Amino acid sequence: MTGSTLQACSACTACDLATTRQTVVISRGNPKADLMLIGEAPGAQEDAQGIPFVGRSGRALDQLLRDVDLDPEHDIYICNAIKCRPPNNRRPKKAELAACRAWLDLQLEAVHPKVIVLTGATAVEAILGIKGGMTQLRGQWQSWNGRSVMPIFHPSYLLRNPSKAVGAPLDLTRQDLDAVRRRLCER
Ligand code: SF4
């Protein structure tokens, strides 16, 4: 996104979330990366700092990326389907996702990623239009506009399910991200 687009996004009032947010949370990471991760919406810490995936969820995500040799600063561009925090971290409404889609499309156009990771059911529904449980969706390659798309569990879900056992959500997510890294190497 260009400077003027970023400025416009930072001042967006296209939906009601503009009245309750502190900051518009646009992205972090490398806008020239081949890999883009899309989550659901900013939480309290993201809203306060204006950066997506900070706090415990963000640290968990960064560790998982490092576990599979992906650098969170250089190898990935990270954003959310919704740029403003929904009150009390409720799920974004359909109208809010629709209102914010134009910004996400601009990000997709600007970054032009080869591979997309979707974290959590809201991101999967927003991009792929598929509804379902992440237990079924995760780890299954999908295709969207010619790009490879990998749904994974949301880091906040992994924090609530911290088992390190083989086959537990944490292990499965590491496997999914390793498949993403290998797909990036194939291209
Ligand atoms: S959530 Fe998106 S559409 Fe709504 S005010 Fe924030 S940036 Fe604008």
Image: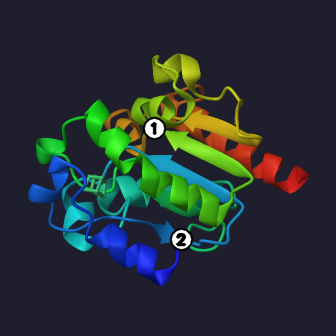
| Whole-percent x, y for residue 99 in the image | 33, 46
Identify residue for label 1. Answer: 123
User: In the image, 62: left or right of 155?
Assistant: right
The numbered dot on residue 180 is: none
Instruction: Check disc 2 and give the amino acid type.
Output: Gly
Do residues under tags 1 and 2 come within 8 Å of each other at their CB atoms? Answer: no
User: In the image shown, does 118 or 20 lie closer to the viewer?
Assistant: 20
* Element marked by disc 2: strand
User: In the image shown, does 36 or 128 lie closer to the viewer?
Assistant: 128
Residue at left 90%, top 50%? 186
Q: Is mark 2 within 8 Å of ligand 1?
A: no
Query: What crowding class fits label 1: few (fewer than 14 Cα within 10 Å), some (14-19), or many (20 or more)?
Result: many
* Element marked by disc 1: helix
| Whole-percent x, y for residue 31 in the image | 60, 71
Q: Nearer the viewer, mark 1 or mark 2?
A: 1
| Whole-percent x, y for residue 61 in the image | 47, 54
Residue at left 40%, top 33%? 122
Where in the image, quadrant-wise, is ligand 1 located?
Answer: bottom left
Q: How many marks?
A: 2
User: In the image shown, does 67 or 13 lie closer to the viewer?
Assistant: 13
When the figure is inspected, residue 84 is found, relative to residue 156, above or below; the finding is: below
Residue 89 visible to the viewer: yes
Identify residue for label 2. Answer: 29
Instruction: Check disc 1 and give the amino acid type.
Output: Ala
- Upstream in the sequence, badge 1 or badge 2? 2
When the figure is inspected, residue 3 is found, relative to residue 86, above or below; the finding is: below
| Whole-percent x, y for residue 93 in the image | 25, 33
Residue at left 47%, top 69%? 28
When the figure is inspected, residue 65 is found, relative to residue 121, above or below; the finding is: below
Q: Quadrant of the C terminus?
A: bottom right
Residue at left 56%, top 64%? 77
User: In the image, 36: left or right of 92?
Assistant: right
